[in-house]
Image (spheres, rainbow, N blue to C red):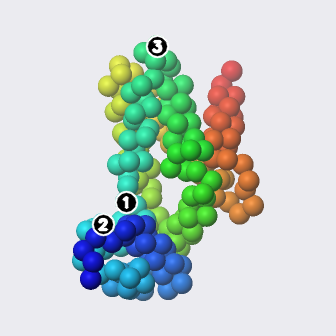
Amino acid sequence: MVRWQPEARERLQKAALELFLANGFDDTTVADIAAVAGLTERTFYRHFADKREVLFGGQDIFQGGFTEAVDSAPADARALDIVADAVAAVCAPTGMFSEERRPHSRLRQKVIAEHPELQERELLKMASLAGTLASALRARGVTEPTATLAAESGVTVFRLSFDQWIAEGSVATLAEIERDLFEALRSLSP
């Protein structure tokens, strides 16, 4: 067998998602995933710690997109504007949520919605993102509770935008949706 497998990570993710949808998360094993991907279990474990990581791996890249945007914001920008720009950067059509990723994201969320343990993991991911954003804002000198309010608001807008983006029949881009939701958020206060 060849030691290096091209696109092994992507093949494992695709196989896992197909199996999770067909057989359920609990009834899918790492061995099943590796076999469908045409790889070994050892190769699976080189890329993922466990089968949950197929759905949640890459969180550091995800959070990094937000923090890079916060770090590069103008020094005099307001906290909510900084967060809005960070969400916009992550939701950009050329980023990790491109239109080509929408079908995959829909299927991923379907698997998560059907399993309470995965729902909890998704909530923890969002809570971690809010904490990371708040820390990045505090590092810029934003005081509390403003840093936490802005971070939590930004994560809420992102989450709602994502849910609308993956909804069946949705045609708007993630960037368009998040922009509209930030406008709605800003309209809540005079």
Relative height, residue 152 to residue 59 (above, below)? above
Quadrant in the picture for the C terminus: top right
Furthest residue toward front? 2
> Is the residue under label 3 in contact with that under label 1 (CB below 8 Å)?
no
Residue 96 appears at what percent x and percent y?
Answer: 50, 49
The residue identified by callout 2 is: 47
The CA distance from mark 2 to mark 3 is 41 Å
- Name the N-terminal-most of marks 1 and 3: 1
The residue identified by callout 3 is: 76
Secondary structure of the residue carrying tag 2 is: helix
The residue identified by callout 1 is: 57
Task: Examine the rendering and report whether any part of residue 42 can be seen.
Answer: yes
Q: Residue at x 43, y 72 (%)?
A: 11
> Is the residue under label 1 in contact with that under label 2 (CB below 8 Å)?
yes
The CA distance from mark 1 to mark 3 is 34 Å
- Name the N-terminal-most of marks 2 and 3: 2
| Amino acid type, callout 2 | His
Task: Examine the rendering and report whether any part of residue 50 can be seen.
Answer: no
Q: Nearer the viewer, residue 102 or 130?
A: 102
Q: Nearer the viewer, residue 106 or 39?
A: 39
Residue 79 appears at what percent x and percent y?
Answer: 48, 24
| Amino acid type, callout 1 | Gly
